[in-house]
Every structure is written in C-alpha cells, then in structure tokens.
Amino acid sequence: MEKYIIVTTLCKDKKVAETICDTLLDKHLVAGCQVSKVDSKYWWNGNLELAHEYKLEFRTVGSFYDLVRDEIASLHDYEVPEISAIEFRDANDEFIAWIDENTTESYEGEEEEESEYEEEDFGLI
C-alpha cells in the first residue's frame, strides 16, 4: 500500500523556492506545493543565525521521496539543505485520490517547462 508524505525544505532565495516548486510540479513529482515566508533561528558554524527563509511543503507519494529529494538538492541554494519528510497518519479519501491523480499516474519524467507564474503570484514579501 502506497504511503503519502509531506516533504519540507527551506530556501533563502525566493527565485530558488519558485524554481524548486515549479520543477517538481512540472515533473508531476508532487501534487501541490505551499510556500510561506518564515523567520528562522539556527546554529551554523558555531554561530546562532537569524534568517528570513521560504518554507516549501510538498504533498506526494512516499515512493517518490528519493526523486523529490534529489531534484530539490540539485536546485537548492544551501550548502546543507534540510530535505525531510513526514508520513500522513490519516487523510481523507478525496485528498489521497487527488495526490494519486497528480503524481503516480502522471510522472513520466517529462521535460521541464517554463513557469507561467510571475513573482507577484506567490504573494510573498
């Protein structure tokens, strides 16, 4: 039985976040992406850092995790990006069907297309 996951990463650059989101959607590796601007505090090289970042969350099937992770890593702007996943414990049938319709049955490794969205479409600062 297929597992369903939410894959998360954070980027410092808005264009990189948009590129990752568009690429994964264009390749049908994910059914959807949510992008939000967040403030983060973390340790890096012995220093406590404060950063404004873009958090990306993707809904997809568990069997695509390696493909999604590798695609994110190839496009990412961090030396050590967080690319993590959590499994859904439960979700409504219609939501699961939507993920299935937009990933598993659609992915054929098709070529990446130009994004139809402008920066303003994300509504982020």
Image (spheres, rainbow, N blue to C red):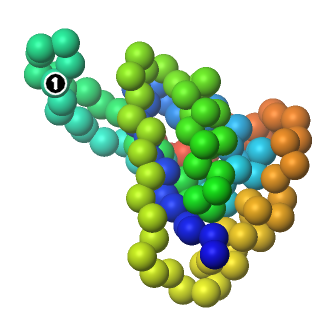
Residue 46 position within the rendered picture, expressed as x and y whole percent measured from the top left:
12, 14
Q: Quadrant of the C terminus?
A: top left
Q: Residue at x 82, y 34 (%)?
A: 112
Q: Residue at x 41, y 16 (%)?
A: 79
Q: Residue at x 20, y 19 (%)?
A: 44
Number of residues whose C-alpha sits closer than 10 Å to that of mark 1, classed few (under 14), some (14–19) or many (20 or more): few
Residue 17 position within the rendered picture, expressed as x and y whole percent measured from the top left:
53, 34
Q: Is residue 103 above or below residue 98?
A: above
Q: Residue 92 lies in what quarter of the image?
A: bottom right
Q: Residue at x 61, y 87 (%)?
A: 93
**Element on which disc 1 rests:** strand
Q: Is residue 44 left or right of residue 34?
A: left
The residue lying toward the viewer, choosing from 41 and 107, is 107
From this viewpoint, is residue 92 visible?
yes
How many numbered discs, if any?
Answer: 1
Q: Is residue 62 left or right of residue 84?
A: right
Residue 80 position within the rendered picture, expressed as x and y whole percent measured from the top left:
38, 22
Q: Of the residues shown, which amino acid type is indicated by label 1?
A: Trp
Q: Is residue 91 above or below residue 53?
A: below
Residue lying furthest front: 1
Q: Is residue 13 above or below residue 123?
A: above
Residue ID for mark 1 = 43
From this viewpoint, is residue 119 visible?
no
Q: Is residue 60 above or below residue 77?
A: below
